[in-house]
Image: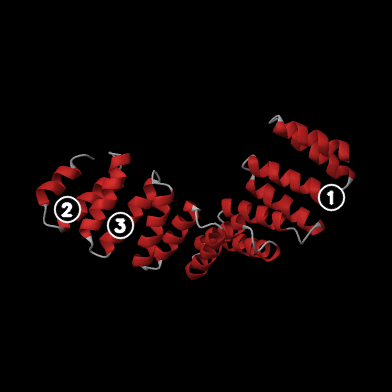
C-alpha cells in the first residue's frame, strides 16, 4: 500500500496525473477503506476538474475518517464547483466545527451560503473569516456582495472599499462600489469609483456605462454622451 501511495505522490509531483490516479487506485484495491488513499484520489480528481468524482471520493474518505476537517473542506469545495451550494454549505459547516480557526474553511462556508442565497448567514461567516485574517481582500469582496444583495448599501460600500484598498488593482471592487453609490444617489462618489475602474481598464463596458449614468444623473448630458461614445 505504502509503495503505491508513494508512487502516486511522486507521479503527481511530476504532474503525470493519469498515472498518479492509477497508482492511488492500485492502493485502494489493497485497502478499500484507506482514508489517505481516498483523500489523495479526491484531491487529484479535483485538480482534473472532475468535481463530481472528487465529491464521491471525499465521501469515501469520510466514511473512514468522518472527523477530518480537511476532508469536509475538500468535499465542500467540490460541491461548490458543482453549484450544489446548499450541500456545499452543509459540508463546510462540518469542517468549521472540526477546524474553527481555519480561515479558508470559513471562506468556503461563506461563499457556499451566498450561493444558496442564505445571505445573512453568509455575512456572518465572512466576518468569521475576516476575524482570522482582516487582510483577505476576497473575503471583504464576498461580504460586500452579500451586503449589496441585501440592499445594505452603506455597509457594502465600506466592504468594497476595504477590498479595493487591499488589492487596488481589483477592478470588480471599484465597479461594485460605484454601483452601490448609484443606488444611494451619490453620483459624485459613483464617478470617483468608476474613474478608478477606467484608470485600469479604459474600455470596461460596465465602468463606462456607470460613469455615463452618474453624469446623466448630475445633469451633465453632454459629458454622459461623450463617455458612452467610448463603448
Which label's residue is closer to the chain start, 3 or 2?
A: 3
Residue plotted at (44% across, 55% down): 141
In the rendered structure, the answer to whether residue 62 lies left or right of residue 202 reads right
- Determine whether 120 is above or below 213 in the image: below
Disc 1 versus disc 3: distance between alpha carbons?
51 Å
Of circles 1 and 3, the one toward us is: 3
Which residue lies under the disc numbered 2? 215
Q: Does dot 3 land on a helix, a strand or a loop?
A: helix
Q: Which residue is mark 1?
A: 34
Dot 2 alpha-carbon crowd within 10 angstroms: few under 14, some 14 to 19, many 20 or more? many
Distance from disc 3 to disc 2, alpha carbons, whole Å, reads 13 Å
Q: Residue at x 42, y 53 (%)?
A: 163
Residue 75: where, in percent of width, then height?
Answer: 67, 54
Residue nearest the viewer, comparing 130 with 46: 130
Disc with the residue nearer the chain's start (1 vs 2): 1
Q: Is residue 40 left or right of residue 93?
A: right
Q: Nearer the viewer, residue 193 or 45?
A: 193
Badge 1 density bin: few <14, some 14–19, many ≥20, Cα 10 Å: some
Name the residue carrying label 3: 179
- Residue 68 coordinates in the image, percent (x, y): 75, 58
Amino acid at each position: 500500500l505504502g509503495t503505491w501511495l508513494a508512487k502516486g505522490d511522486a507521479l503527481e509531483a511530476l504532474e503525470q496525473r493519469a498515472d498518479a490516479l492509477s497508482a492511488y487506485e492500485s492502493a485502494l484495491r489493497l485497502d478499500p477503506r484507506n482514508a489517505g488513499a481516498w483523500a489523495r484520489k479526491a484531491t487529484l480528481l479535483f485538480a482534473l476538474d472532475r468535481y463530481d468524482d472528487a465529491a464521491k471520493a471525499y465521501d469515501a474518505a469520510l466514511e473512514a475518517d468522518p472527523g477530518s476537517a480537511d476532508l469536509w473542506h475538500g468535499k465542500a469545495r467540490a460541491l461548490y464547483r458543482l453549484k450544489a451550494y446548499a450541500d456545499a454549505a452543509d459540508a463546510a459547516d462540518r469542517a468549521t466545527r472540526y477546524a474553527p480557526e481555519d480561515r479558508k474553511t470559513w471562506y468556503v462556508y461563506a461563499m457556499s451560503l451566498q450561493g444558496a442565497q442564505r445571505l445573512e448567514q453568509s455575512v456572518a461567516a465572512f466576518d468569521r473569516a475576516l476575524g482570522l485574517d482582516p487582510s483577505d481582500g476576497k473575503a471583504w469582496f464576498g461580504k460586500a456582495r452579500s451586503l449589496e444583495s441585501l440592499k445594505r448599501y452603506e455597509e457594502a460600500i465600506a466592504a468594497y472599499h476595504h477590498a479595493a484598498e487591499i488589492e487596488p488593482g481589483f477592478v470588480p471592487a471599484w465597479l461594485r462600489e460605484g454601483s452601490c453609490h448609484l443606488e444611494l444617489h451619490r453620483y459624485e462618489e459613483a464617478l470617483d469609483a468608476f474613474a478608478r475602474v477606467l484608470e485600469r481598464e479604459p474600455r470596461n463596458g460596465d465602468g463606462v456605462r456607470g460613469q455615463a449614468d452618474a453624469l446623466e444623473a448630475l445633469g451633465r448630458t453632454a459629458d454622459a454622451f461623450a463617455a458612452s461614445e467610448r463603448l
